[in-house]
């Protein structure tokens, strides 16, 4: 389980589609689908299902969302702390830099 996989899951859950998550991350839909597949395999749960109006969380996905959101935020804070220690400017809190694009966390 990686931060990238968790971030992809959180965005799919919040935005309701793989396409929207891929657009937010600046990656292909295939990359988001692969991240979800790896996370599903690792956790042994579907996490999300496709419905007629977007993605729906399974009970396991619903339970994961809160924890995964916290982990994504902590990952961003860890990244910012290391960059600050290196003298780099701090990024605004509440997001994660992946593939050189900022993804905002709406949970804060």
Image (cartoon, rainbow, N blue to C red):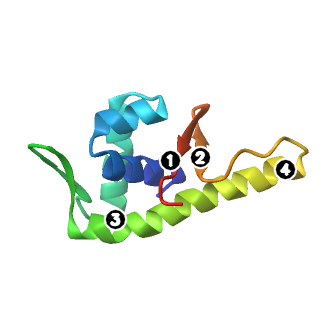
Residue 90: x and y, percent? 79, 46
Residue 100: x and y, percent? 62, 31
In front of the other: 47 or 104: 104
Q: Is residue 11 above or below residue 32?
A: below
Tell me the SS state at disc 4: helix
Residue 44 in view: no
Tell me the SS state at disc 2: strand
- Residue beneath disc 1: 4
- Residue beneath disc 3: 43
Residue 65: x and y, percent? 38, 64
Residue 21: x and y, percent? 37, 39
Using a 10 Å C-alpha cutoff, classify the residue at mark 2 as few (fewer than 14 neighbours), some (14 to 19) or many (20 or more): many
What residue is at 53 percent from the left and 53 percent from the top?
3
Q: Which dot, 1 or 3, sits closer to the camera?
A: 1
Q: Which dot, 4 or 3, sits closer to the camera?
A: 4
Distance from the alpha carbon under mark 2 to that under mark 4 = 15 Å
Q: Is residue 98 above or below residue 5?
A: above
- Residue beneath disc 2: 96
């Amino acid at each position: 389980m990686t931060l990238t996989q968790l971030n992809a899951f959180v965005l799919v859950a919040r935005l309701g589609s793989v396409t929207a998550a891929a657009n937010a991350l600046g990656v292909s839909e295939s990359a988001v689908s692969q991240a979800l597949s790896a996370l599903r395999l690792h956790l042994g749960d579907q996490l999300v299902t496709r419905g007629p109006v977007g993605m729906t969380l399974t009970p396991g996905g619903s339970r994961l969302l809160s924890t995964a959101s916290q982990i994504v935020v902590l990952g961003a804070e860890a990244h910012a702390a290391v960059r600050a220690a290196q003298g780099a400017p701090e990024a605004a809190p509440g997001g994660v830099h992946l593939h050189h694009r900022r993804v905002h966390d709406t949970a804060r």
